[in-house]
Image (cartoon, rainbow, N blue to C red):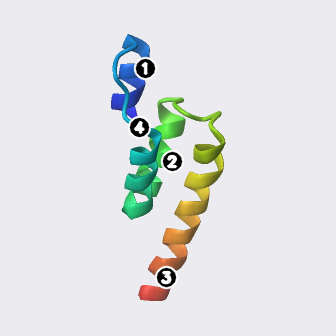
Amino acid sequence: MLMDKGKAVRNVWRIPEWFLLTIALLGGSLGSLLGMYLFRHKTKKQAFALGLPAMVCLHLILFFFMF
């Protein structure tokens, strides 16, 4: 999130949203959620505002079922 936020401020090529969401889905949801609020980036995008907390919940449920 920090890299994409910096690129947004400088108005240069950005990291695609689908890539950020894919990284979160593959296990980086908690870090993505923390980065989103820490750097105030993509907090108004519905896919991030609703999707990242849902992914965190999904990952926590999967974690508890695995262990």
6 vs 29, left or right, is left
Please give the residue where the numbered disc 1 appears in the rendered image.
Answer: 8
Q: How many angstroms separate mark 3 from mark 1 (CA)?
A: 37 Å
Q: Viewer-nearest of labels 1 and 4?
A: 4
Please give the name of the residue rendered at 41% of the width and 36% of the height, measured from the top-left corner. 1
Q: Which label sits on residue 16?
A: 4
Contact between labelled residues 1 and 3, with CB atoms less than 8 Å apart: no
Mark 2 or mark 1, which is nearer the start of the sequence?
1
Q: Residues within 10 Å of mark 1 (few under 14, many from 20)?
A: some
Q: Secondary structure at mark 4?
A: loop
Residue 18, position as x, y percentages in the image: 45, 46
Please give the residue where the numbered disc 2 appears in the rendered image.
Answer: 33
Please give the name of the residue rendered at 53% of the width and 62% of the height, measured from the top-left corner. 56
Q: How many angstroms separate mark 3 from mark 2 (CA)?
A: 20 Å
Please give the name of the residue rendered at 39% of the width and 46% of the height, measured from the top-left corner. 19
Hey, what amino acid is under mark 4?
A: Pro
44 vs 41, left or right, is right
Hey, what amino acid is under mark 2?
A: Leu
The residue nearer to you, when weighing 14 against 49, is 14
Q: Secondary structure at mark 2?
A: helix
Please give the residue where the numbered disc 3 appears in the rendered image.
Answer: 64
Q: Secondary structure at mark 1?
A: helix
Q: Residues within 10 Å of mark 3 (few under 14, many from 20)?
A: few
Contact between labelled residues 2 and 4, with CB atoms less than 8 Å apart: no
Residue 3, position as x, y percentages in the image: 33, 30
Please give the name of the residue rendered at 55% of the width and 34% of the height, measured from the top-left corner. 42
Hey, what amino acid is under mark 3?
A: Phe
The residue nearer to you, when weighing 5 against 60, is 5
Q: Would you identify the image quadrant in which residue 28 lies? A: bottom left
Q: Viewer-nearest of labels 3 and 1?
A: 1
